[in-house]
Protein backbone atom coordinates (compact mmCIF):
# COMPACT_ATOMS: atom_id res chain seq x y z
CA UNK A 1 0.00 0.00 0.00
CA UNK A 2 1.30 3.46 -0.87
CA UNK A 3 1.33 6.13 1.80
CA UNK A 4 1.88 9.87 2.10
CA UNK A 5 4.70 11.18 4.29
CA UNK A 6 3.67 14.38 6.11
CA UNK A 7 6.12 16.51 8.05
CA UNK A 8 5.22 17.13 11.71
CA UNK A 9 5.09 19.32 13.72
CA UNK A 10 2.87 21.21 13.16
CA UNK A 11 0.07 18.69 13.36
CA UNK A 12 -2.70 18.60 10.73
CA UNK A 13 -5.58 20.96 11.59
CA UNK A 14 -9.23 19.86 11.56
CA UNK A 15 -11.48 21.96 9.30
CA UNK A 16 -14.79 20.15 8.91
CA UNK A 17 -16.39 16.73 8.49
CA UNK A 18 -19.64 15.21 7.31
CA UNK A 19 -21.63 12.08 6.62
CA UNK A 20 -24.00 11.28 3.77
CA UNK A 21 -25.58 8.50 1.74
CA UNK A 22 -25.29 9.06 -1.99
CA UNK A 23 -28.13 7.82 -4.16
CA UNK A 24 -27.51 5.92 -7.38
CA UNK A 25 -26.68 8.39 -10.13
CA UNK A 26 -24.89 10.88 -7.84
CA UNK A 27 -21.22 11.69 -8.31
CA UNK A 28 -18.70 14.18 -6.95
CA UNK A 29 -18.44 17.57 -8.66
CA UNK A 30 -15.06 18.80 -10.01
CA UNK A 31 -12.96 20.68 -7.47
CA UNK A 32 -9.45 21.81 -6.65
CA UNK A 33 -8.68 23.28 -3.24
CA UNK A 34 -5.76 23.57 -0.83
CA UNK A 35 -6.83 21.07 1.85
CA UNK A 36 -6.77 17.31 2.32
CA UNK A 37 -10.06 15.52 1.71
CA UNK A 38 -10.33 12.15 3.47
CA UNK A 39 -13.09 9.91 2.10
CA UNK A 40 -14.16 6.79 4.03
CA UNK A 41 -16.76 4.55 2.41
CA UNK A 42 -18.88 2.32 4.67
CA UNK A 43 -20.98 0.66 1.95
CA UNK A 44 -21.52 0.92 -1.78
CA UNK A 45 -18.82 2.22 -4.13
CA UNK A 46 -17.51 5.71 -4.83
CA UNK A 47 -15.67 6.46 -8.06
CA UNK A 48 -13.16 9.30 -7.77
CA UNK A 49 -10.28 10.54 -9.89
CA UNK A 50 -7.40 12.78 -8.81
CA UNK A 51 -5.65 14.40 -11.75
CA UNK A 52 -5.38 11.43 -14.18
CA UNK A 53 -5.56 8.65 -11.58
CA UNK A 54 -8.87 6.85 -11.08
CA UNK A 55 -9.81 5.25 -7.75
CA UNK A 56 -12.64 2.90 -6.86
CA UNK A 57 -13.46 3.09 -3.14
CA UNK A 58 -15.76 0.31 -1.94
CA UNK A 59 -17.13 -0.50 1.51
CA UNK A 60 -14.47 -0.39 4.26
CA UNK A 61 -12.22 1.57 1.93
CA UNK A 62 -10.66 5.04 1.96
CA UNK A 63 -9.02 7.61 -0.28
CA UNK A 64 -6.96 10.63 0.79
CA UNK A 65 -7.21 13.42 -1.80
CA UNK A 66 -4.31 15.86 -1.72
CA UNK A 67 -4.29 19.68 -1.70
CA UNK A 68 -3.85 21.45 -5.01
CA UNK A 69 -4.89 18.45 -7.11
CA UNK A 70 -8.06 18.40 -9.20
CA UNK A 71 -10.54 15.71 -8.28
CA UNK A 72 -13.91 14.65 -9.67
CA UNK A 73 -16.31 11.71 -9.63
CA UNK A 74 -15.45 9.98 -12.90
CA UNK A 75 -18.65 7.94 -12.86
CA UNK A 76 -21.85 7.99 -10.80
CA UNK A 77 -22.66 5.67 -7.92
CA UNK A 78 -24.62 2.59 -9.00
CA UNK A 79 -26.01 1.79 -5.53
CA UNK A 80 -26.64 3.63 -2.25
CA UNK A 81 -23.19 4.62 -1.02
CA UNK A 82 -22.55 5.67 2.60
CA UNK A 83 -19.53 7.89 3.13
CA UNK A 84 -17.83 9.97 5.81
CA UNK A 85 -15.69 12.85 4.63
CA UNK A 86 -13.22 14.97 6.54
CA UNK A 87 -11.19 18.02 5.55
CA UNK A 88 -7.95 18.99 7.24
CA UNK A 89 -5.21 21.46 6.41
CA UNK A 90 -1.51 20.72 6.30
CA UNK A 91 1.44 21.34 4.02
CA UNK A 92 1.77 19.10 0.93
CA UNK A 93 3.18 15.63 1.47
CA UNK A 94 6.97 15.33 1.57
CA UNK A 95 6.73 12.29 -0.67
CA UNK A 96 4.62 9.30 -1.62
CA UNK A 97 6.20 5.93 -0.96
CA UNK A 98 5.30 2.26 -0.46
CA UNK A 99 4.58 1.31 3.16
CA UNK A 100 7.38 -1.25 3.10
CA UNK A 101 9.88 1.59 2.66
CA UNK A 102 8.88 3.39 5.88
CA UNK A 103 11.48 3.18 8.65
CA UNK A 104 8.90 2.80 11.41
CA UNK A 105 11.44 2.29 14.19
CA UNK A 106 13.75 5.15 13.17
CA UNK A 107 14.93 6.86 16.33
CA UNK A 108 13.86 10.49 16.86
CA UNK A 109 16.43 12.62 18.64
CA UNK A 110 15.35 13.53 22.15
CA UNK A 111 15.09 17.27 22.65
CA UNK A 112 17.10 19.19 25.20
CA UNK A 113 16.39 22.30 27.25
CA UNK A 114 18.53 24.31 24.82
CA UNK A 115 16.39 23.49 21.76
CA UNK A 116 14.36 26.36 20.32
CA UNK A 117 12.59 24.45 17.55
CA UNK A 118 11.13 20.93 17.41
CA UNK A 119 12.86 18.00 15.77
CA UNK A 120 11.46 17.06 12.35
CA UNK A 121 9.23 14.00 12.52
CA UNK A 122 6.79 12.37 10.13
CA UNK A 123 3.23 11.11 9.93
CA UNK A 124 2.43 8.38 7.42
CA UNK A 125 -1.09 8.07 6.03
CA UNK A 126 -2.50 5.56 3.53
CA UNK A 127 -3.33 7.03 0.14
CA UNK A 128 -5.96 4.49 -0.86
CA UNK A 129 -7.00 1.07 0.34
CA UNK A 130 -8.96 -0.92 2.90
CA UNK A 131 -9.45 0.29 6.48
CA UNK A 132 -10.82 -1.21 9.68
CA UNK A 133 -14.05 0.71 10.27
CA UNK A 134 -14.78 -0.35 13.86
CA UNK A 135 -12.21 1.91 15.57
CA UNK A 136 -12.81 4.80 13.13
CA UNK A 137 -16.59 5.16 13.24
CA UNK A 138 -16.90 6.21 16.93
CA UNK A 139 -14.30 8.93 16.37
CA UNK A 140 -16.03 10.17 13.22
CA UNK A 141 -19.41 10.25 14.98
CA UNK A 142 -17.93 12.16 17.92
CA UNK A 143 -16.42 14.67 15.48
CA UNK A 144 -19.84 15.22 13.90
CA UNK A 145 -21.45 15.62 17.32
CA UNK A 146 -18.91 18.21 18.44
CA UNK A 147 -19.05 20.04 15.12
CA UNK A 148 -22.82 20.44 15.33
CA UNK A 149 -22.69 22.26 18.68
CA UNK A 150 -19.12 23.48 18.96
CA UNK A 151 -18.16 25.95 21.68
CA UNK A 152 -14.73 27.42 22.21
CA UNK A 153 -14.42 25.33 25.34
CA UNK A 154 -14.29 22.15 23.25
CA UNK A 155 -12.46 23.46 20.17
CA UNK A 156 -9.31 21.58 21.13
CA UNK A 157 -11.27 18.32 21.37
CA UNK A 158 -11.88 18.27 17.61
CA UNK A 159 -8.17 18.70 16.95
CA UNK A 160 -7.35 15.89 19.40
CA UNK A 161 -9.89 13.61 17.72
CA UNK A 162 -8.32 14.31 14.33
CA UNK A 163 -4.95 13.30 15.75
CA UNK A 164 -6.43 10.05 17.10
CA UNK A 165 -8.11 9.29 13.77
CA UNK A 166 -4.90 9.85 11.80
CA UNK A 167 -3.00 7.75 14.34
CA UNK A 168 -5.46 4.92 13.75
CA UNK A 169 -4.99 5.18 9.98
CA UNK A 170 -1.22 5.07 10.46
CA UNK A 171 -1.58 2.04 12.73
CA UNK A 172 -3.43 0.29 9.94
CA UNK A 173 -0.46 0.91 7.67
CA UNK A 174 1.93 -0.49 10.26
CA UNK A 175 -0.23 -3.60 10.57
CA UNK A 176 0.62 -4.42 6.95
CA UNK A 177 4.25 -5.01 7.86
CA UNK A 178 3.56 -7.84 10.33
CA UNK A 179 4.91 -11.12 9.08
CA UNK A 180 7.64 -9.38 7.09
CA UNK A 181 10.85 -11.43 6.88
CA UNK A 182 13.04 -8.32 7.03
CA UNK A 183 11.17 -7.05 10.11
CA UNK A 184 11.70 -10.38 11.88
CA UNK A 185 15.43 -10.20 11.15
CA UNK A 186 15.61 -6.54 12.26
CA UNK A 187 13.86 -7.42 15.53
CA UNK A 188 16.36 -10.23 16.17
CA UNK A 189 19.26 -7.86 15.56
CA UNK A 190 17.74 -5.30 17.94
CA UNK A 191 17.23 -7.88 20.68
CA UNK A 192 20.79 -9.15 20.23
CA UNK A 193 22.28 -5.66 20.52
CA UNK A 194 20.07 -4.71 23.46
CA UNK A 195 21.06 -7.85 25.37
CA UNK A 196 24.75 -7.06 24.84
CA UNK A 197 24.56 -3.33 25.32
CA UNK A 198 27.75 -3.07 27.41
CA UNK A 199 29.81 -5.31 25.11
CA UNK A 200 31.82 -3.96 22.16
CA UNK A 201 29.97 -4.36 18.86
CA UNK A 202 31.43 -7.14 16.72
CA UNK A 203 29.66 -7.73 13.40
CA UNK A 204 31.10 -11.21 12.90
CA UNK A 205 30.10 -12.28 16.41
CA UNK A 206 26.54 -11.08 15.81
CA UNK A 207 26.33 -12.90 12.48
CA UNK A 208 27.57 -16.10 14.09
CA UNK A 209 25.04 -15.83 16.93
CA UNK A 210 22.06 -15.05 14.68
CA UNK A 211 23.08 -17.18 11.68
CA UNK A 212 22.57 -14.31 9.26
CA UNK A 213 24.92 -12.74 6.74
CA UNK A 214 26.28 -9.49 8.23
CA UNK A 215 25.29 -7.33 5.25
CA UNK A 216 21.80 -8.83 5.06
CA UNK A 217 21.16 -8.29 8.78
CA UNK A 218 22.42 -4.71 8.50
CA UNK A 219 20.13 -4.02 5.52
CA UNK A 220 17.11 -5.36 7.42
CA UNK A 221 17.86 -3.22 10.47
CA UNK A 222 18.43 -0.10 8.39
CA UNK A 223 15.19 -0.67 6.50
CA UNK A 224 13.13 -0.65 9.71
CA UNK A 225 15.09 1.78 11.89
CA UNK A 226 17.15 3.89 9.49
CA UNK A 227 20.28 2.88 11.45
CA UNK A 228 23.18 0.50 10.94
CA UNK A 229 23.84 -2.05 13.72
CA UNK A 230 26.73 0.05 15.02
CA UNK A 231 24.59 3.20 15.05
CA UNK A 232 21.74 1.37 16.79
CA UNK A 233 24.20 0.00 19.38
CA UNK A 234 25.39 3.54 20.05
CA UNK A 235 21.82 4.87 20.38
CA UNK A 236 20.71 2.26 22.91
CA UNK A 237 23.88 2.82 24.95
CA UNK A 238 23.11 6.53 25.13
CA UNK A 239 19.48 5.86 26.05
CA UNK A 240 20.56 3.56 28.89
CA UNK A 241 23.09 6.17 30.05
CA UNK A 242 20.35 8.79 30.17
CA UNK A 243 18.11 6.43 32.14
CA UNK A 244 20.86 5.78 34.69
CA UNK A 245 21.57 9.50 35.04
CA UNK A 246 17.86 10.22 35.63
CA UNK A 247 17.00 7.32 37.90
CA UNK A 248 20.15 6.53 39.88
CA UNK A 249 22.81 8.35 41.82
CA UNK A 250 25.69 6.54 40.14
CA UNK A 251 28.73 8.72 39.44
CA UNK A 252 29.06 9.63 35.76
CA UNK A 253 32.19 7.49 35.46
CA UNK A 254 30.25 4.47 36.76
CA UNK A 255 27.45 5.17 34.28
CA UNK A 256 29.99 5.24 31.46
CA UNK A 257 31.42 1.89 32.54
CA UNK A 258 27.98 0.31 32.94
CA UNK A 259 27.03 1.11 29.33
CA UNK A 260 30.33 -0.17 27.98
CA UNK A 261 32.68 2.82 27.80
CA UNK A 262 35.96 2.26 29.57
CA UNK A 263 37.28 5.59 28.30
CA UNK A 264 35.48 8.14 30.47
CA UNK A 265 36.52 11.17 28.38
CA UNK A 266 35.38 9.46 25.18
CA UNK A 267 31.99 8.79 26.79
CA UNK A 268 31.66 12.46 27.79
CA UNK A 269 32.40 13.59 24.21
CA UNK A 270 29.94 11.09 22.71
CA UNK A 271 27.21 11.94 25.21
CA UNK A 272 27.56 15.67 24.59
CA UNK A 273 27.53 15.14 20.81
CA UNK A 274 24.45 12.88 20.95
CA UNK A 275 22.35 14.56 23.63
CA UNK A 276 23.48 18.15 23.25
CA UNK A 277 24.59 18.51 26.88
CA UNK A 278 27.15 16.99 29.20
CA UNK A 279 26.04 14.12 31.49
CA UNK A 280 26.14 16.42 34.51
CA UNK A 281 24.01 19.10 32.88
CA UNK A 282 21.57 16.45 31.62
CA UNK A 283 21.21 14.96 35.11
CA UNK A 284 20.49 18.36 36.68
CA UNK A 285 17.97 19.24 33.95
CA UNK A 286 16.23 15.87 34.40
CA UNK A 287 16.01 16.58 38.12
CA UNK A 288 14.17 19.83 37.50
CA UNK A 289 17.09 22.25 37.55
CA UNK A 290 17.92 24.57 34.65
Image (spheres, rainbow, N blue to C red):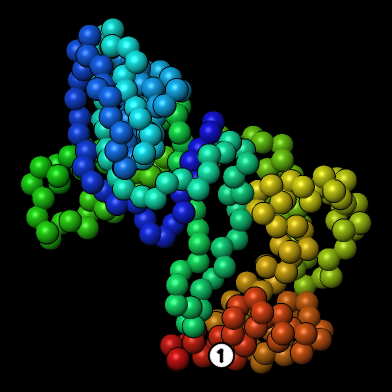
260 displayed left or right of 252? right
Quick check: 113 left or right of 65?
A: right
Query: x, y percentage for residue 40?
Result: 33, 29
The kind of secondary structure element at disc 1 is helix
Quadrant position of residue 235: bottom right
Does residue 191 appear to the left or right of 286 in the view shown?
right
- 231 vs 115: above or below: above
**Residue at position x 49%, y 87% in the image:** 285
The x, y position of residue 136, in whole percent, is 32, 36
Question: In the image, is residue 3 above or below residue 29?
Answer: below
Residue drawn at (61%, 49%) of the image: 103
Q: Which residue is mark 1?
A: 281
Q: Pick the residue in front: 35 or 248.
A: 35
Left or right of 61 on screen, residue 30 = left
Q: Position of residue 31 (x, y in %)?
A: 28, 29
Q: State which quarter of the image contains the C terminus.
A: bottom left
Which residue is at a point 82% across and 84% down the rendered structure image? 262
Q: Looking at the rendering, which quadrant does residue 79 occupy?
A: top left
Question: In this picture, is 46 found above or below 272?
Answer: above
Of 58 and 249, nearer the camera is 58
Q: Is residue 159 above or below residue 119?
A: above
In-front residue for pair 58/253: 58
Residue at x 20% of width, y 30% of height: 19
Amino acid sequence: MDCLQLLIPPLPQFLTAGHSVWRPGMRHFPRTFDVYDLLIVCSGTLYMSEEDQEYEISGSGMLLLEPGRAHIGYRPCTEPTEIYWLHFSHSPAVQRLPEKSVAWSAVVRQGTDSDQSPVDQYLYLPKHGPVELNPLLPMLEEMLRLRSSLTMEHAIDLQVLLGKLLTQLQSGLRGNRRGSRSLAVADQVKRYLESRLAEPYRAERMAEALHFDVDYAARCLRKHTGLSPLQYHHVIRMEEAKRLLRQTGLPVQAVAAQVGYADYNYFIRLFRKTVGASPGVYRHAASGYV
